[in-house]
């Protein structure tokens, strides 16, 4: 018999209400924040779900904006800002996976700005251009345990003209309130549970492996990976396991908290691949992970003792890598990018885009555009041991 996880209210890294049924707090939180005319932002797949209709009703039939792609683009944001302004809304309630949450955060950034969207790309001191007082408040409610976007200070948005993902950043993009309700993740099918769960694992792992001194991030990342090792197979095997769903929601939030330290080569490749091929971000991360690890093997040996100890594995890279491959197989992860329809024809361009991606700066070693092209080629062809 499952023992319910206790309802909790955390204040790190923002105000987070955790527990089964916590979504029913939404109307009260809006009132507390003086959000009297919110815009409900979600994705098209969720917009017709009964629980979304219930949330809408609890907010006095708040309008819904759901014209958001799986990899949200600039037009999605601009259209959403237009809806927000036309409706004279005073805040955003974001419900969904990473796509909806990122789009909502980008909209909240832009609703009161006079500059164009890309003027706030995370380059140099661009964030200082933001009129902070004109940003909208956000309440974030994730329905997947993967991106952790509910505790992120940035949003990934596709620039369709350049076919690349750009990072919009401002510290105040961190949502004011978060509701983590495991019951909202019960409907996730196994394939999405797998991809989003491994996405959370990649966030924790790349944060842990990123260079630099950040013991708080390292500690969170190690605990997050230990939780995923224990609970993701259970959530995948039994989607109604509320304990497993609850722990995975927490581990996802922990990953996004930890990666303030940095990300790495997996994300550097996944970002351009998502922009060009419009494939799910979590699935790309899950497929790419072992190929990037093999490239970094020689420079991450010193990280293995603590990682293997946290995961209860025999010490050393080989034990960790073997476990990871077995986990991916258990979760039905495709072995190669070819399995999801990609080929190597654009390998050189993808290598250049990955090298230029900000996440590349957090890789444990410097990689060239040619290195990224090689990793991409291996991931298409299945050359894990090259």
Image (spheres, grey):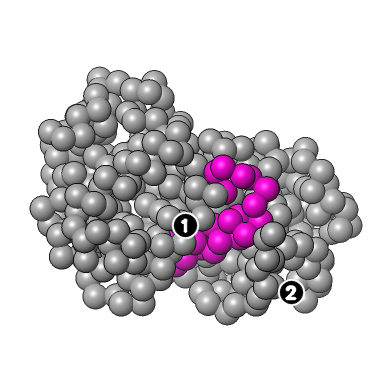
> Where is 10 relative to 98, above or below?
below
Magenta-colored span: 235-259
Q: Kindly identify the residue that appears in the image at 25 percent across and 27 percent down.
A: 382
Quadrant holding the C terminus: top left
Q: Earlier in the sequence, mark 2 or mark 1?
A: 2
Q: Position of residue 369 (x, y in %)?
A: 16, 40
* Foreground disc of the pair 2, 1: 1
Direction front: furthest residue: 1
Q: Kindly identify the residue that appears in the image at 56 percent across and 42 percent down.
A: 237
Q: Kindly identify the residue that appears in the image at 29 percent across and 59 percent down.
A: 313
- Where on the picture, by quarter, is residue 263? bottom left
Q: Is 195 in front, or is 267?
A: 195
Q: Residue 239: within the magenta?
A: yes
Q: Is 340 in front, or is 135?
A: 340
Q: Residues within 10 Å of mark 1 (few under 14, many from 20)?
A: some
Query: What residue is shown with label 2?
Result: 33
Quadrant holding the N terminus: bottom right
Q: Kindly identify the residue that appears in the image at 39 percent across and 44 percent down.
A: 327
> Where is 107 relative to 346, above or below?
below
Direction bottom: furthest residue: 11
Which disc is residue 230 wearing?
Answer: 1
Which disc is residue 345 wearing?
Answer: none
- Where on the picture, by quarter, is residue 163? top left
């Amino acid at each position: 018999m499952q023992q319910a996880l206790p309802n909790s209210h955390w204040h790190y890294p923002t105000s987070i209400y955790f527990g089964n049924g916590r979504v029913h707090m939404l109307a009260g939180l809006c009132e507390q924040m003086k959000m009297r005319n919110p815009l409900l932002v979600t994705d098209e797949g969720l917009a017709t779900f009964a629980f979304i209709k219930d949330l809408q009703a609890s907010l006095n039939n708040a309008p819904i904006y759901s014209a958001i792609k799986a990899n949200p683009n600039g037009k999605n944001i601009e259209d959403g800002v237009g809806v927000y302004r036309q409706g004279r809304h005073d805040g955003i309630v974001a419900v969904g996976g990473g796509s909806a949450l990122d789009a909502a955060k980008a909209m909240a950034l832009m609703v009161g700005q006079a500059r164009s969207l890309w003027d706030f790309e995370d380059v140099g001191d661009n964030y200082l251009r933001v009129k902070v007082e004109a940003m909208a408040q956000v309440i974030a409610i994730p329905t997947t345990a993967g991106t952790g976007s509910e505790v992120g200070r940035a949003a990934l948005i596709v620039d369709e003209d350049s076919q690349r993902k750009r990072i919009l950043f401002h510290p105040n993009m961190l949502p004011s309130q978060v509701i983590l309700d495991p019951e909202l993740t019960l409907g996730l099918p196994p394939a999405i549970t797998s991809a989003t769960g491994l996405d959370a694992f990649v966030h924790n792992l790349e944060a842990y492996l990123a260079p630099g001194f950040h013991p708080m991030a390292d500690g969170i990342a190690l605990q997050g990976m230990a939780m995923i090792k224990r609970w993701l197979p259970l959530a995948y095997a039994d989607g109604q396991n509320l304990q497993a769903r609850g722990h995975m929601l927490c581990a996802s939030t922990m990953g996004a908290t930890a990666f303030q330290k940095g990300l790495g080569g997996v994300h550097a490749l996944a970002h351009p691949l998502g922009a060009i091929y419009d494939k799910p971000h979590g699935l790309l991360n899950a497929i790419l992970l072992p190929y990037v690890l093999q490239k970094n093997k020689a420079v991450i040996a010193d990280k293995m003792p603590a990682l293997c100890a946290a995961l209860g594995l025999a010490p050393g890279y080989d034990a960790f890598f073997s476990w990871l491959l077995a986990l991916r197989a258990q979760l039905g992860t495709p072995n190669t990018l070819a399995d999801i329809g990609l080929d190597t024809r654009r390998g050189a361009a993808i290598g250049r885009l990955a090298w230029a991606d900000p996440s590349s700066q957090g890789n444990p070693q410097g990689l060239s555009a040619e290195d990224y092209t090689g990793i991409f080629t291996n991931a298409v062809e299945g050359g894990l041991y090259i």
